[in-house]
Amino acid sequence: MKSSQKLTKEQLEPYFLEWDKVAADLANLHRQRDKRSKEAMLAGLEVYSDLLAHCREALQDNEFQPLNGSERLSFVEASLGTYAAYRQMDELFAELKKIIARKRIEIKRLNE
């Protein structure tokens, strides 16, 4: 399977939909200052890790990640229950979505 076939919207959309659900839960938990936000962040981290692994495999690039991705991910892991970690994770997903769109365009242009 070509990398362009593994980076289709259909392949990746479930990851982003799952994050949207987790993010909505996290927003509510933080609004209520609920300590269960840590468990929800763990679920978000799992979705992010799965998405990143899928992209790396599709692109055959083990270094693929958003700018300063490993440092930002370390921050999130170190401060799971905080609002700042939730915001950082949300930004990582948004940035990853943009990078994937750019990669799709690059691959499409190379295949033309």
Image (spheres, helix red, strand yellow):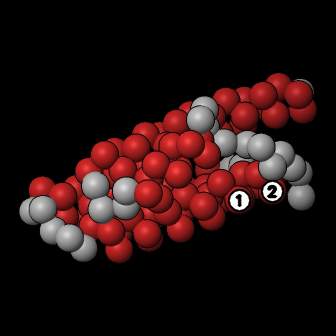
Who's the residue at 72% across and 34% down the image?
103
Q: Is residue 68 left or right of residue 60?
A: left
Name the spot of residue 88 as percent of width and height, x first.
40, 44
Q: Is residue 19 left or right of residue 1?
A: left
Q: Which mark is residue 53?
A: 1
Q: Which mark is residue 97?
A: none
Instruction: For mark 1, give the secondary structure.
Output: helix
Mark 1 neighbour class, 10 Å CA radius: few under 14, some 14 to 19, many 20 or more: some
Q: Is residue 101 left or right of residue 74?
A: right
Who's the residue at 36% across and 50% down the image?
85
Q: Residue lying farthest left?
A: 32
Instruction: For mark 2, give the secondary structure.
Output: helix
Name the spot of residue 75 as percent of width and height, x first.
46, 49
Who's the residue at 60% across and 32% down the image?
67
- Quarter of the figure with residue 32: bottom left
- Circle 2: residue type: Glu
Is residue 27 or residue 35 the one in the foreground?
35
How many marks overall?
Answer: 2
| Circle 2 residue | 57
